[in-house]
Amino acid sequence: MIKGIGIDLIELDRINQIIKRNDRFVQRILTEKERGQLAAYKNESRQIEFVAGRFAAKEALGKAMGTGIGKVSFQDIEISRSEHGGPEMKLHGYEHLKIWVSISHSEQHAIAQVVIEE
């Protein structure tokens, strides 16, 4: 049964500006494992896409839960790659939920959609 659906769209330039102004932003948004994945990208524009996509996905999860970010933190949510290469999302403390996530980018935006099944 579907418990919630969320979507989020973010401008890549906005994320880039935030990162340049706040050197702790990436540490606040990404888990240690995600920061390791980020470090594998040497191209700055690809790094911005990565951070923006993860940010949008985590915001979309908050919307799908109906609580927004606050009841859960960005650090409680981890996005990794599935065995097939697509994104896979886990939420600490809610392992009983099946979370579906899709992340996409354009030249200017990142978008993510999350569906929660119970």
Image (cartoon, grey):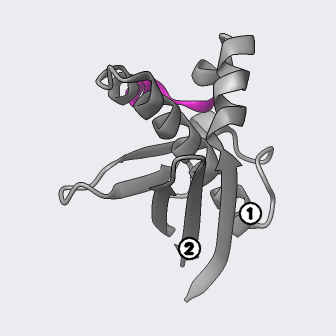
Quadrant in the picture for residue 111: bottom right
Disc 2 is placed on an element classified as: strand
- Residue at the farthest bottom position: 1
Question: Which of these two is toward me, 42 or 89?
Answer: 42
Q: Quadrant of the N terminus?
A: bottom right
Magenta-highlighted residues: 28-35
Helix or strand or loop: what does disc 1 sit on? helix
Q: Residue at x 64, y 59 (%)?
A: 61
Q: Quadrant of the C terminus?
A: bottom right
Q: Is residue 19 above or below residue 79?
A: above
Residue 63 numbered tag: 1
Q: Is residue 17 left or right of residue 83?
A: right
Q: Could you tell me the amino acid type at mark 2? A: Val
Q: Are marks 1 and 2 in contact (CB under 8 Å)?
A: no
The residue closer to the viewer here, 48 or 60, is 48
Residue at image mark 2? 115
Query: Disc 1 residue type?
Result: Lys
Where is residue 93? Give x, y as percent.
57, 50
